[in-house]
Image: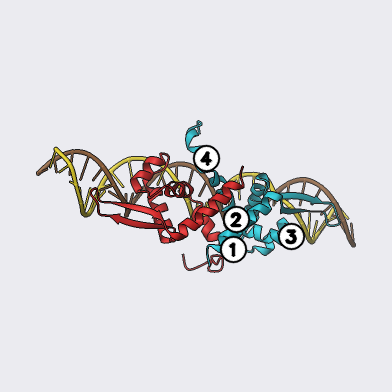
Chain colours: A cyan, B red, C yellow, D brown
Amino acid sequence: MTTRNSTANQETCPAQALLKLLSGKYKAEIFRLATAGPVRFSSLLRDIPEANRQSISVALRELEEHGLLKKDIIKNKPLHIEYQLSPRGVEVISVFKQLEGLIG
Amino acid sequence: MTTRNSTANQETCPAQALLKLLSGKYKAEIFRLATAGPVRFSSLLRDIPEANRQSISVALRELEEHGLLKKDIIKNKPLHIEYQLSPRGVEVISVFKQLEGLIG
DNA sequence: GCGTGTGGTCATATTAATCTGACTTATTGT
DNA sequence: ACAATAAGTCAGATTAATATGACCACACGC
């Protein structure tokens, strides 16, 4: 892509990047479920029946990379992986709350 | 599209729809410019040089349809059209502010 | 060593968002 | 009458997001 549009990529609005990160098709729902406790790949697939593996996988990776979710490997009996809200993730909850307030 | 996915369309998270509306490529920047006063189609094209007519047009229409911008036809000398934040639009500003706060 | 559960990846479609360039309609200036 | 400005629309191309189905690796129970 010949490094074109190098200017178009720089953030105009600081909120833009975060907004885009949060706006994925299942991100809001993942956050919602994560507020009730740690979530797992398979539990999300169950709880969001219209979602697919790929999308859940991408969403979890993006949210983790941006520090909103924390990934934990649980070595207990059925060894598995849990994702929970990081401190930054918890902060984001207030944004969702505010958005909900603007609707009703 | 044979009315399929009627279940997939129903909102899971109430914030989801609003989040998606706000996450368009230039929406945040449009809001930012609109806080400084009424904006116009042509002024947005100038002030967001990387944007194109179509995208600005679609963004303005969507934001107006969802009641975040108010469209005014100004009959003064160079007859033109202005878009300004509606009361609901002003409320949304606080969401952007909060998002910005989560970054720094 | 075989099947099951968990947590994915990969290549490939399909769908949605954005871009491009040509065109339009109405108003105004000369 | 002619050109310019303002605010778009439209068809078609490109790019990004999401979906589908096949596949993979590891741990565990049997």
Residue flagged by tag 2: what amino acid is it?
A: Val
Q: Which residue is mark 1?
A: B13
Q: Are marks 1 and 2 on the same chain?
A: no
What chain does mark 3 sit on? A
Secondary structure of the residue carrying tag 1 is loop
Q: Are marks 2 and 3 on the same chain?
A: yes
Secondary structure of the residue carrying tag 2 is helix
Q: Which residue is mark 3?
A: A37
Which of labels 2 and 3 is toward the front?
2
First along the sequence among labels 3 and 4: 4
Label 4 environment density (alpha carbons within 10 Å; few <14, some 14–19, many ≥20) = few
Distance from label 2 to label 3 (Cα)? 19 Å
Label 3 environment density (alpha carbons within 10 Å; few <14, some 14–19, many ≥20) = few
Residue in the foreground of this view, choosing between A99 and A78: A99
Q: Are marks 4 and 2 on the same chain?
A: yes
- Residue A4: percent from left, percent from top: 48, 32
Q: Which residue is mark 2?
A: A95
Residue flagged by tag 3: what amino acid is it?
A: Gly
Q: Are marks 3 and 1 on the same chain?
A: no
Q: Which residue is mark 4?
A: A11
Residue A93, quarter of picture: bottom right
Which residue sits furthest top?
Answer: A2
Residue in the foreground of this view, choosing between C21 and B23: B23
- Residue C13: percent from left, percent from top: 53, 52
Distance from label 3 to label 4 (Cα)? 33 Å
First along the sequence among labels 2 and 3: 3
Secondary structure of the residue carrying tag 4 is loop
